[in-house]
Amino acid sequence: MIEHLENVWKILWSKGVDRQHMIARSMVSPATCCLVNPDKERTVERAFSSVKHISDHLREKYEC
């Protein structure tokens, strides 16, 4: 997921989107479809855990 997001960012940066401006204002959140699931909270907990991991990694890498 991180690699995919960074690839999208690279495309945007190559098209002239300001890198620092975009990084400073980016947010990562789970899709709402994962919040309604037969296994109830397990999927939600995994989704938010993944989002935290992605966010922590990107913050460290881009020093946000």
Image (cartoon, grey):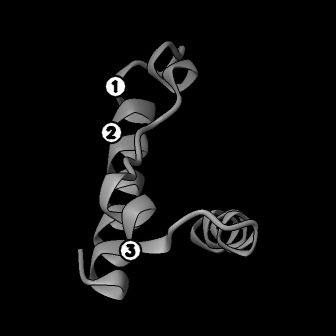
Disc 3 to disc 2, C-alpha distance: 20 Å
Callouts 1 and 2 close, C-beta under 8 Å? yes
Residue at 75 percent across and 66 percent down: it is 15
Report the side of 31 relative to 8 (left or right): left
Q: Where residue 51 appears, x then y in whole percent?
A: 38, 52
Foreground mark, 3 or 2?
A: 3
Residue at 41 percent across and 48 percent down: it is 28
The residue that mark 3 highlights is 58
Disc 1 to disc 2, C-alpha distance: 6 Å
Q: Amino acid at mark 1?
A: Glu
- Other residues around mark 1 within 10 Å, as few (<14) / some (14–19) / many (≥20): few
Look at the picture and state if 4 lies above or below 50. below
The residue that mark 1 highlights is 41
Q: Quadrant of the N terminus?
A: bottom right
Callouts 3 and 2 close, C-beta under 8 Å? no
Q: Amino acid at mark 2?
A: Glu
Q: Where residue 32 appears, x then y in whole percent?
A: 50, 21
Residue at 41 percent across and 55 percent down: it is 50
For the residue labelled by badge 2, is the local secondary structure a helix, a strand or a loop?
A: helix
Report the side of 15 relative to 33 (left or right): right
Furthest toward the left, the residue is 64
The residue that mark 2 highlights is 45
The number of numbered badges drawn on the structure is: 3
